[in-house]
Image: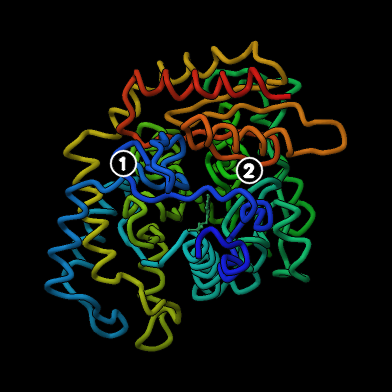
Amino acid sequence: MLDNPNTMTSFWMPFTANRDFLREPRMIHSAEGMYYTSSDGRKIMDGTAGLWCVNAGHRDPLIVEALQRQVEELDYAPNFQFSHPQAFELSARLTGMMPDGMNHAFFTNSGSESVDSALKIALHYHRARGDASRTRLIGRERGYHGTGFGGISVGGIVKNRMYFGSLLTGVDHLPHTHDLGRNAFSRGCPAHGAELADDLERIVALHDASTIAAVIVEPMAGSTGVLLPPKGYLKRLREICDRHGILLIFDEVITAFGRLGAATASDYFEVTPDIITTAKGLTNGIIPMGAVIVSDEIYNSAMENADGPIELFHGYTYSANPMACAAALAALDSYQQNDLFQRAALLSQPWEDQLHALKALPNVIDIRNLGLIGAVELAPRDGVPGTRAFDAMKRAWDAGIMIRITGDIIALSPPLIITEPEIATLCQTLGDVLSDLP
Ligand SMILES: Cc1ncc(COP(=O)(O)O)c(C=O)c1O
């Protein structure tokens, strides 16, 4: 069946060039640690931690064993009006890793659901306090917040928005911070662009603060090609939100759980938002789960201002599913026992050096890095943008590495267990691919 393109059309693949894939499938059979094995028996280094989620590497024994134990005991329990101890244990562990004053977790099943939940919680917060005119949501150009209607509305990717009608109303966008003219080949956060946060003042002047509920940004925009915050930008955004009573949401679906060498980007940048969205690394990718972490102020306000016994009319059948809780608890154990956040911090320098060594290769117009994230931006081919990186991805697969692409940007985010020699292999293999790429 798998070699018959006619039967394979039964799977409509997400965010994929389906017709191209059926002609040239890239199939994965198994995985262990840093590596996949392809269906044709080749070892492929995971340069992207799956989709930015397998931070502890594949099939981490701690997580595998925890899931085996869990399924023997409790497969499913509802969390509407009932619960189970792991949900409370996980909330305590998770919020213990969050910035001070963020002590409450609401569970979802994905980053998209975390984002939609966070936006709803922000609207609910203002309304419950009697500030019901605060309904506007401010996102950012080139932001990615998943694929729910909330997420695509505050997100800033034209293709994710243009086909899907009028989206949420009352949304505005900050400008993105990607500025190759001033910041190309920066190491770490770029020097120029903190003033782009001031655009929030323009948006406030346009709509009035009394109509704005929240601003949502990724502290580091991953999915649109690793767009790093200019130095000072996030602090400035926090200050402006504070000045106008606007909630600040950090979408940390990629950045939480060690990607930058700290538990969260909030921690790394020393800027505390009001709400943090997470998913991906929460369970090391093994079971779908997300979490929205909110400040004491938001949680207490919901409890104090409730107009009936149920404080928030929101939730999912699989919120805090026991199997997902077990996976998450074991993932957090693994991060801690193997010191993976610290490891990412230590590896960030050799990572930066190896990546920036690719600078002189043909068509490379930028290289950027932070923590264990990197991007190589290629010049687009005339008239056919995106095809150069797409070809690079296919050739990289043939050469034994998995890379991720967005337009003509190659993004790298290996599992945090990567070794220095593996960093060298990953970067050198990518270098070989780019050297021969027309
Ligand atoms: C910042 C951010 N938010 C939300 C999402 C959506 O997550 P999911 O695909 O789990 O719905 C992603 C996924 O890449 C993301 O990077």
Q: Position of residue 159 (x, y in %)?
A: 74, 55
Quarter the C terminus occupies: top right
Residue drawn at the location 52% of the way across and 62% of the way down: 112
Res. 295 mark: none
Q: Residues within 10 Å of mark 1 (few under 14, many from 20)?
A: many
Of marks 1 and 2, the one in the foreground:
1
Q: Is residue 168 visible?
A: yes
The residue singled out by tag 1 in the image is: 57
Is 411 left or right of 99, judged from the image as shown? right
Is 90 left or right of 253, judged from the image as shown? left
Q: Position of residue 289 (x, y in %)?
A: 37, 62
Q: Quadrant of residue 155?
A: bottom right
Q: Quadrant of residue 268?
A: top left
Which one is in front, 267 or 334?
Answer: 334
Res. 224 mark: 2
Is 394 left or right of 325, judged from the image as shown? right
* Residues at discs 1 and 2 in contact (Cβ within 8 Å): no
Asked which secondary structure carries label 1, the reply is loop
